[in-house]
């Protein structure tokens, strides 16, 4: 074979490559239109019966030299690429997705001054659970001294064991509200069921949806109808995609004021209660305009590494920190090992004050 013949054959390949490229893009455009129709109909992008029909037709019309198995493998990749494109286009339309580099949700609390997501580092703190007026008063006094404005007032405690402390219920909310008013603070408390909205609305400034309820779509939709902002915690084994879709339930139901909390995910590691996903925080800052808070208490499950985790959380570009504080942690009725002594909280605040972010977190 002469060099001229080789070049001629290669030229034919080049032409065919461009033809295939044009056809692939044409196919992707049509597939995208199909995806829009399916989305309007409320059906899934993936139709296994349709895929099977297409593969069967390709096998029946295959004249070689590729085997049917090779043809099926090639076209399955084409199908996957088309579906990925449809999903990407659908995600770009969700309300919690960042559309521009400077887009951000800033949540203003009732005083008109306290804001979350405005570039300042917000601290949410307090005991794991409300136990008594004295416990809450002592803790709130220390927090207020450091300028903390958002107090944990947890009174419903979903525990792994039904025999563990379950919380004080409404009497605990009354205590939390009384203490918060005394120190000019706002209350956040976890809601377990939509039936509690009416009662809790009289006490809380921020609703809190816990990790166990992150995918409770009925509760999330109900949170879309409340006037208060909503804290949404990432589920124990939830992907970032699932986390953002959970937030989308709230936002799409009418409440744009959602605060995400990274609280660690379940992995094989046993040194900490969960594994703090700092990489996930960075990704969420890129992908979403919602503020993101890092929970160093539930992610670690231990107080001795609170300061380094807090410093990392601030350095990651997070909008704030959640840390549990108790006047006497060893006698706490829940999560005693992770709650800080008050003097440790002061040390933590001094440590994070020394962390300075020179550059803003880049956005897409």
Image (cartoon, helix red, strand yellow):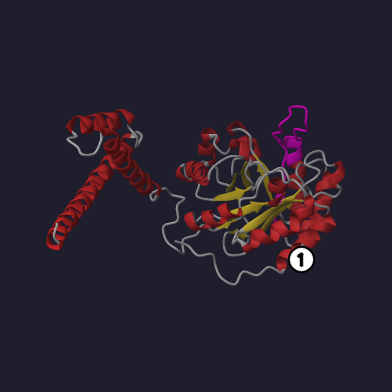
Residue 53 vs 236, above or below: the answer is: above
Quarter location, residue 153 = top right
- Which span is picked out in magenta? 149-173
**Helix, strand, or loop for circle 1?**
helix
The image shows residue 60 at horizontal and vertical percentages of 19, 29
Image-based side of 58 in relation to 240, left or right:
left
Is residue 164 part of the magenta span, yes or no? yes
Placement of the N terminus among the 4 image quadrants:
bottom left
Residue 104 vs 357, above or below: the answer is: above
Query: Extreme front residue here?
Result: 1
Judge the density around disc 1: few (<14), some (14-19), many (≥20) Cα neighbours within 10 Å.
few
At x 13%, y 60%, the residue is 2
At x 58%, y 65%, the residue is 119
Question: Which residue is more in the foreground, 94 or 196?
Answer: 94
The image shows residue 24 at horizontal and vertical percentages of 24, 48
Question: Which residue is more in the foreground, 322 or 118?
Answer: 322
The image shows residue 313 at horizontal and vertical percentages of 65, 58
Is residue 231 part of the magenta span, yes or no? no
Q: Which residue is mark 1?
A: 350
Question: Which residue is more in the foreground, 100 or 52?
Answer: 52
Quarter location, residue 38 = top left
Q: Is residue 27 visible?
A: yes
The image shows residue 99 at horizontal and vertical percentages of 41, 57
Q: Is residue 203 visible?
A: no
At x 50%, y 37%, the residue is 221
């Amino acid at each position: 074979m002469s060099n001229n013949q080789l070049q001629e054959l290669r030229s034919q390949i080049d032409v065919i490559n461009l033809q295939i490229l044009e056809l692939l893009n044409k196919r992707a455009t049509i597939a995208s239109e199909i995806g829009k129709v399916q989305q309007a109909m409320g059906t899934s992008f993936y139709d296994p019966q349709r895929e099977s029909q297409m593969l069967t037709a390709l096998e029946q019309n295959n004249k070689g030299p590729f085997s049917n198995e090779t043809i099926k493998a090639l076209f399955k990749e084409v199908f996957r690429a088309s579906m990925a494109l449809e999903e990407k286009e659908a995600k770009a339309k969700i309300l919690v997705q960042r559309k521009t580099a400077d887009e951000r949700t800033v949540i203003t609390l009732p005083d008109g001054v306290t804001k979350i997501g405005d570039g300042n580092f917000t601290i949410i703190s307090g005991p794991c659970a409300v136990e008594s007026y004295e416990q809450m008063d002592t803790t709130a006094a220390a927090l207020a001294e450091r300028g903390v404005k958002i107090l944990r007032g947890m009174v419903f405690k979903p525990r792994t064991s039904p025999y563990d402390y379950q919380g004080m219920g409404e009497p605990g909310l009354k205590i939390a509200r009384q203490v918060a008013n005394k120190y000019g603070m706002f209350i956040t408390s976890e809601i377990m069921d939509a039936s509690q909205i009416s009662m809790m609305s009289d006490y809380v400034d921020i609703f809190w949806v816990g990790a166990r309820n992150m995918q409770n779509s009925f509760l999330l939709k109900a949170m879309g109808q409340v006037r208060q902002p909503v804290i949404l915690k990432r589920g124990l084994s939830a992907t970032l995609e699932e986390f953002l879709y959970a937030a989308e339930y709230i936002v799409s139901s009418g409440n744009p004021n959602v605060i995400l909390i990274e609280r660690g995910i379940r992995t094989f590691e046993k040194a900490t209660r969960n594994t703090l996903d700092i990489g996930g925080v960075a990704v969420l800052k890129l992908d979403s305009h919602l503020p993101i808070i890092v929970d160093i208490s539930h992610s670690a499950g231990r107080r001795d590494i609170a300061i380094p985790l807090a410093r990392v959380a601030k350095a990651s570009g997070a909008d704030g920190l959640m840390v549990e504080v108790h006047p006497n942690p060893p006698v706490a009725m829940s999560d005693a090992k992770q709650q800080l002594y008050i003097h440790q909280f002061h040390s933590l605040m001094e440590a994070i004050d020394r962390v300075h972010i020179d550059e803003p977190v880049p956005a897409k």
